């Protein structure tokens, strides 16, 4: 497990700048904003993002919780957190905080909502991670997940080959493996959604970006 963490830190530390440019692209930003909408945040709420990267979701999260709320971004990679912190300081957000930590063992207490975008597909045991995240969210709070996937639109199936190549290039360790990176991505997504839906109500799934992006959300039951 330690080797996997080291590989992730090295890979994303090297490409933090490129990651930030892609994450902040208008179309990607629209997918992220749609995911944040599913949290149904209110001013004053506390929300945590697991695998916050360079803080691309911070603007949408901060807008929803307002200056009286709190945003906490958790990530493993120091280079990512430096860019996330710089984004926070650039905007003068005193209530947005970044914390170095492993998304599988989140270093946060109870929150009103939790979001994770393009992260569960990289975790070796995403089901366990999602279950641990659900334990952090108060009854009535929501959890929203976002991931890439192969499109289900027949006319676009050839583009799935591009997604496979992109996933192999951008997922730490996959270039050295013989199994399909997109199948692994989808298996991990399925495990994540199963864990999420097993313990939530008011569940939702959706496809975005011509079917290449999947969204799932649910509410932690009360009582």
Image (tube, grey):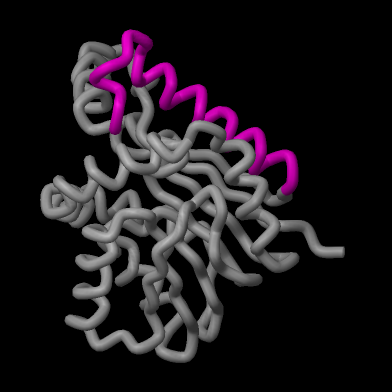
| Above or below: residue 144 compared with residue 151 | below
Identify the residue at horizontal 62%, vertical 71% (top origin). Answer: 109
Which stretch did the figure color magenta?
A: 172-199
Q: Residue at x 42, y 17 (%)?
A: 183
Of the 4 image quadrants, the one containing the C terminus is: bottom right
Query: Residue 113, position in %: x, y?
Result: 57, 65
Does residue 165 appear left or right of residue 111 in this picture? left
Please name the predominant secondary structure of the magenta segment in the image. helix
Q: Position of residue 159 (x, y in %)?
A: 21, 18
Task: Name which residue lies at 31% across and 54% down.
Answer: 77
Residue 216, magenta (yes or no): no
User: Is residue 190 part of the magenta span, yes or no?
Assistant: yes
Q: Residue furthest front?
A: 2
Q: Residue furthest right?
A: 223
Residue visible at 51% across and 70% down in the picture: 47
The answer to which of 200 and 203 lies nearer the viewer is 200
Q: Quadrant of residue 148?
A: top left
- The answer, for residue 182, to whether it is visible in the render is yes
Along the line of sight, the residue nearer the viewer: 31 or 71: 71
Viewer can see residue 207: no
**Which sits in the foreground, 92 or 173?**
173
Is 145 situated left or right of 136 in this image? left
Where residue 153 appears, as percent x and y from the top left, is 34, 19
């Amino acid at each position: 497990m330690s080797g996997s963490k080291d590989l992730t830190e090295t890979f994303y530390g090297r490409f933090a700048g490129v990651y930030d440019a892609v994450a902040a692209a208008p179309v990607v930003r629209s997918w992220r904003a749609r995911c944040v909408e599913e949290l149904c945040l209110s001013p004053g709420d506390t929300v945590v993002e697991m695998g916050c990267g360079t803080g691309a979701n911070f603007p949408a999260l901060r807008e929803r919780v307002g200056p009286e709320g709190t945003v906490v971004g958790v990530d493993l990679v120091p280079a990512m957190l430096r860019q996330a912190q710089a984004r926070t300081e650039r905007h003068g957000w005193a209530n947005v905080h970044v914390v170095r930590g492993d998304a599988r063992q989140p270093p946060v207490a109870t929150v009103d909502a939790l979001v994770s975008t393009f992260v569960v597909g990289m975790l070796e045991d995403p089901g366990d991670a999602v279950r641990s995240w659900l334990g952090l969210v108060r009854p009535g709070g929501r959890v929203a997940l976002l991931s890439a996937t192969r499109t289900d639109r027949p006319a676009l199936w050839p583009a799935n080959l591009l997604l496979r190549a992109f996933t192999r290039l951008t997922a730490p360790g996959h270039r050295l493996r013989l199994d399909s990176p997109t199948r692994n991505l989808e298996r991990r997504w399925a495990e994540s959604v199963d864990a999420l839906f097993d313990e939530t109500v008011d569940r939702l799934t959706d496809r975005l970006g011509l079917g290449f992006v999947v969204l799932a959300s649910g509410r932690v039951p009360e009582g």
